[in-house]
Image (cartoon, rainbow, N blue to C red):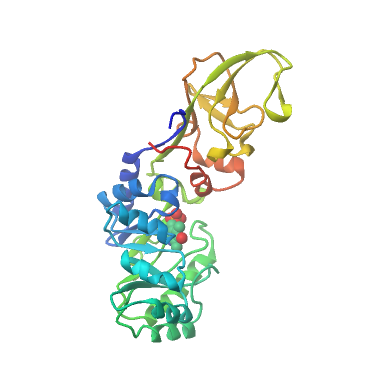
């Protein structure tokens, strides 16, 4: 990459977050969730840091993501969180990747695709109220348990996922926990029982539940699951910064317009800086009007964001090469997320491969 636009990953921050979370979850194991390229931070980097600092297992969404970790030499247990087509279960077995099972029918089909040398580790996925993936009734569970009669299968876990763990007043959260515990009682001798994401892990810490893994995603990266979680997660350190540099700095005259559509007109003489990042990098056009940080000061994006660059209004002349912070100190990820009307999770994973991670 020759263009000075990059994502900076603070490895020490991730290490700190992992250790601090680990200290709060008692004797539960920590599963570091590194799906979507480690929430945009680089899955291999994050997995290695997490494992070095106390994480015990990894989770990804896709089989491709698991294979990437295995090919990088990572040997820790990996659980896939997304569903797999039954015809691909041998691949999961070959790479020693555990998969979720959510129906007896899926398992019946999967068994037909396993060969003698396979050994498929599975986690039963219960839909306790998220309405996404999983079985919903005891009958479905019983039917599924009857399909476990194969030596090629190893039932390793049972889990569920909360819909509202990051909302403190939610009744659904408690309901889901109770529902799930009902399913757990029906499945004796299962090694791993897990439910918590980042928000739930910190809320359920210290409670007398049979859960023995927490699945930590967003908090690893030092971002909040929601504003309501700030008091619980005040120790987090953000690991993600997005930076660039001024490529051209010019003085424009009153009346001059900036960028496509001429949507911005300079009211007086102004210093304008051109920054080499645009919507093809994942920096949305909707950021027009948002402020970036130069020399500690907010500088508004004026005119439309282009595919590969954007323009900001500077308070004074700055030399070409001056650093611009789009996300980082002075420009928190949550502010960018609020501006776009979304959550920090989406912002973190929207940057394209054009932006190198350092
Ligand atoms: C993504 C995901 C997580 C991690 O959630 P965070 O809120 O980022 O901690 C945990 N469990 C499942 C099933 C997920 O899909």
Question: Looking at the image, which residue is at 40% across and 77% down?
Answer: 113
The answer to whether residue 335 is seen in the rendering is no
Q: What is the quadrant of residue 298 in the picture? A: top right
Residue 114 lies, in percent from the top left, at 36, 76
Q: Quadrant of the N terminus?
A: top left
The image quadrant in which ligand 1 is located:
bottom left
Q: In which quarter of the image is the C terminus?
A: top left
Residue 295 lies, in percent from the top left, at 48, 21
Vertical placement of residue 167 versus 101, above or below: above
Question: Looking at the image, which residue is at 44% across and 59% down?
Answer: 61
The answer to whether residue 8 is seen in the rendering is yes
Q: In this view, does 245 lie to the left or right of 52?
A: right
Residue closer to the observer: 176 or 83? 83
Residue 6 lies, in percent from the top left, at 44, 33
Q: In this view, does 190 lie to the left or right of 87?
A: left
Residue closer to the observer: 222 or 5? 5
Residue closer to the observer: 324 or 66? 66
């Amino acid at each position: 990459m020759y263009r000075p636009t990059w994502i900076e990953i603070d490895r020490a921050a991730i290490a700190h977050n992992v250790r601090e979370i680990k200290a709060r979850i008692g004797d539960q194991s920590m599963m570091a969730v590194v799906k979507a390229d480690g929430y945009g931070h680089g899955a291999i980097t994050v997995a290695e840091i997490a494992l070095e600092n106390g994480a015990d297992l990894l989770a990804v969404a896709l089989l491709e993501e698991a294979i990437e970790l295995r090919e990088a030499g990572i040997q820790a247990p990996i659980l896939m969180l997304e569903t797999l087509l039954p015809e691909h279960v041998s691949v999961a077995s070959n790479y020693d990747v555990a998969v979720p099972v959510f129906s007896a029918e899926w398992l019946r089909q999967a068994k037909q695709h396993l060969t003698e040398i396979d050994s498929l580790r599975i986690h039963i996925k219960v839909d306790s109220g998220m309405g996404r993936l999983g079985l919903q009734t005891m009958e479905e569970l019983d039917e599924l348990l009857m399909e476990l009669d194969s030596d090629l299968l190893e039932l390793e876990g049972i889990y569920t996922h909360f819909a509202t763990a990051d909302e403190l007043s939610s009744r659904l959260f408690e309901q889901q926990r109770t529902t799930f515990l009902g399913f757990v009682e029906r499945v004796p001798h299962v090694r791993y029982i897990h439910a918590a994401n980042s928000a739930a892990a910190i809320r359920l810490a210290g409670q007398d539940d049979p859960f023995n893994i927490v699945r930590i995603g967003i908090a690893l990266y030092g971002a909040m699951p929601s504003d309501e979680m700030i008091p619980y997660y005040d120790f987090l350190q953000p690991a993600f910064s997005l930076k660039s540099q001024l490529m051209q700095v010019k003085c424009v005259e009153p009346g001059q317009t900036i960028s496509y559509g001429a949507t911005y007109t300079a009211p007086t003489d102004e210093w304008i800086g051109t920054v080499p990042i645009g919507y093809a990098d994942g920096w949305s056009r909707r950021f027009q009007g948002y402020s970036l940080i130069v020399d500690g000061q907010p500088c508004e994006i004026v005119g439309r964001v282009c595919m590969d660059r954007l323009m900001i209004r500077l308070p004074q002349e700055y030399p070409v090469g001056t650093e611009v912070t789009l996300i980082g100190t002075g420009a928190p990820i949550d502010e960018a997320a609020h501006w776009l009307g979304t959550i920090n999770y989406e912002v973190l994973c929207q940057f394209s491969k054009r932006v190198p991670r350092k």
